Image (cartoon, coloured by chain):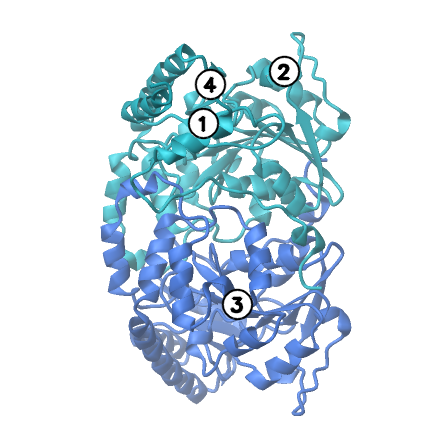
Chain colours: A blue, B cyan
């Protein structure tokens, strides 16, 4: 009685640790090591607490306009959510029929099966091929059972926790094959070579989701958005909470999106650090997946991954470890500052000494 | 294809107008006319944009502790949401079985049937008696079909849009009768004589929800919470988005809740204005429901309610009008400042002149 059966049975999503101890080097949740744009600070200073008295614009009008301008699309093709996690959850309510399916790659963002369970849908995990490659041949033929692409498929690109990006021409054939809605979860795309906005513009079943948490250094603010066909955006608008994004989040997000240069400069720094760290880890015998994100998915040379995770933690460096058949030999390391990388490498090297 | 059938058919919730024109007297969405506590301003000034870089505490630990301290309950009995609207929506996912029911009084908060539709549940509206009274006799016997109280019932108390409060002993018999979870939606309770926390403490199927939007003057921030049995709170935790409340909202809400005196002073001013306005409207022949909230539910003496709404709007005063068989003869007027009341009364009187 009282608790819904599938909720009682639910294994909830387990977010990365947020230690109260500020002295830890935090390379576990893919946060940006650099502060947000100074315009965010200015918008914060300009915020009159009087404006907090009133309900926010339920449609996030000004912020939608800003996002639309950034991407050169119409505002009717933009949806704003309380973090892209909310957008993903809303997709399961807007696009999955009762008794429907939710598909996703495995391994991928571990929230998807939880969202599927909450919706009461059938989970349709689609295993990645060897080396975490996508199950697609060079001709663009996907090895995908029908059930996976029937109602909603979360296509994380670049993928997490692997960091690898599927080329757009392959993503296109996947979306064309799908019967239902394909959400291209592009939380990390600002760190990558290409993106899927063109697909969201051309195909009537494709939404791209984005986050301000990583490239814009605003994980604490909770703003994400979706871009795609107006018909899909309208459905998200119908099922969202009326005032899903507060006035502070709307204003600060708009300020951040008015300074794309700041974001791009930080992204460039992180990419440089990433490539340097990749080289250093490879030199130490780690196998490192090619990353198009702000993290590295690495398999230690000699030591078991869990032991590396524990040892780093004992050295006040947090990385992420995912238990499970496909992931247990790896750790995911967020790319921080160069100094963070140095500390990480020093801690790794300490074992040899 | 693509859009879920019941979402395609959905009539979404229609929030009150938020005019861009700042010169309007806004008595349509029950906002507080006074600013939030100065401690909110201080917390805003202390916010380092650096903290925005990091994910917020997913458990809202400090804020839960604060809420727990305010109400003298354990933190495990507190849930924090992105506005109480999010808490209500989560209840439909945590406590309503597939094929279940969602009950609510009619008229009441018009969001409930929308939440029921989104969940794909059966709507179980329970009509209020004549004069918007609850269908309960003096012996505490409720005239309630079983279907209404099977899975989830939203019991708004004080009720909106009527403003009336159901005495706690009657609420208790209702909750004892219910098979499912009863959510006592107490968004307006700080303006009332009594509350239902005792019921949430004593009964294993009762949650109380609260909002910082009205009494704390923080509608723009989006923070609400629930208090009740740890077993129900846990279920809400399982189905929420991981980071459902941002760091700014967590900090500012905690600041507001550290200054209960400020809230209580504003509530007292609003109650005084309410009683004065009630007298003035009654003197003009309006029939006015006894209000335990920050709004008045009134039936104009001569003019049709819709016409009063339109005429006030033409005079730059926004109130709320709900079309429908039980509500079409009434308007809902938020209680603003004394000056707002004077402007309202002057606009009403202008017709006579």
State which chain disc 2 sits on. Answer: B
Q: Which residue, given by chain and number where applicable, does mark 1 sit on?
A: B308
The quarter of the picture where the N terminus of chain B appears is bottom right
- Give the camera-side residue of B89 and A320: B89
Tell me if A206 is positioned left or right of B275 in this view. right
Label 1 residue SS: helix
User: Residues under labels 1 and 4: Cα distance?
Assistant: 20 Å
State which chain disc 1 sits on. Answer: B
Q: Which residue, given by chain and number where applicable, does mark 2 sit on?
A: B130
**Are dots 2 and 1 in contact, CB under 8 Å?**
no
Are both tags, 4 and 3, on one chain?
A: no
Q: Which residue, given by chain and number where applicable, does mark 3 sit on?
A: A321
Can you tell which quarter of the image residue A266 is in?
bottom left
- Give the camera-side residue of B159 and B171: B159
Q: Position of residue A339 (x, y in %)?
A: 29, 74
Identity of the residue drawn at 29% across and 28% down = B262
Can you tell which quarter of the image residue A140 is in?
bottom right
Label 4 residue SS: loop
**Are dots 4 and 3 in contact, CB under 8 Å?**
no
- Give the camera-side residue of B146 and B159: B159
Q: Please identify the residue farthest to the top as the structure is shown.
A: B138
Are both tags, 3 and 2, on one chain?
A: no
**Are dots 4 and 2 in contact, CB under 8 Å?**
no
State which chain disc 3 sits on. Answer: A
Q: Nearer the viewer, mark 4 or mark 2?
A: 2
Q: Please identify the residue farthest to the front as the structure is shown.
A: B353
User: Residues under labels 1 and 3: Cα distance?
Assistant: 63 Å
Sequence-wise, the earlier of marks 4 and 2 is 2
Q: Please identify the residue farthest to the bottom as the structure is shown.
A: A138
Q: Which residue, given by chain and number where applicable, does mark 4 sit on?
A: B291
Identity of the residue drawn at 42% across and 75% down = A190
Q: Nearer the viewer, mark 3 or mark 2?
A: 2
């Amino acid at each position: 009685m009282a608790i819904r059966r599938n909720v009682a049975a639910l294994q909830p999503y387990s977010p990365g640790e947020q230690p109260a101890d500020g002295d830890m080097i935090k390379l576990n949740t893919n946060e940006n090591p650099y502060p947000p744009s100074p315009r965010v600070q200015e918008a914060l200073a300009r915020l009159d607490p009087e404006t907090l008295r009133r309900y926010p614009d339920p449609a996030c009008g000004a912020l939608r306009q800003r996002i639309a301008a950034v991407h050169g699309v119409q505002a009717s093709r933009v949806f704003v959510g309380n973090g892209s996690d909310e957008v993903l959850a809303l997709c399961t309510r807007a696009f999955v029929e009762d008794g429907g399916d939710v598909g996703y790659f495995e391994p991928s963002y571990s929230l998807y099966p939880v969202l599927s369970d909450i919706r009461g849908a059938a989970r349709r995990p689609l295993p990645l091929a060897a080396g975490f490659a996508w199950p697609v041949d060079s001709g663009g033929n996907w090895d995908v059972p029908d059930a996976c692409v029937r109602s909603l498929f979360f296509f994380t690109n670049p993928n997490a926790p692997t960091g690898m990006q599927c080329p757009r021409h392959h993503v296109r054939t996947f979306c064309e094959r799908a019967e239902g809605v394909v959400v291209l979860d592009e939380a990390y795309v600002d760190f990558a070579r290409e993106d899927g906005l063109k697909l969201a513009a051309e195909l009537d079943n494709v939404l791209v989701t984005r986050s301000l948490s990583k490239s814009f250094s605003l994980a604490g603010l909770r703003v994400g958005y979706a871009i795609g066909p107006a018909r899909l955006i309208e459905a998200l608008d119908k099922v969202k909470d009326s005032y899903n994004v507060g006035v502070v989040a709307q204003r600060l997000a708009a300020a951040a999106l008015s300074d794309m240069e700041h974001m791009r400069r930080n992204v460039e720094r992180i990419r440089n650090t990433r490539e340097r760290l990749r080289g250093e880890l490879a030199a130490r015998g780690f196998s490192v997946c090619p990353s198009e994100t702000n993290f590295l998915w690495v398999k230690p040379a000699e030591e078991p991954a869990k032991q590396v995770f524990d040892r780093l933690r004992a050295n006040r460096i947090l990385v992420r470890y995912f238990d499970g058949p496909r992931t247990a030999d790896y750790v995911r390391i967020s790319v921080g500052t160069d100094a963070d990388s140095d500390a990480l490498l020093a801690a790794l090297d300490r074992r040899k000494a």
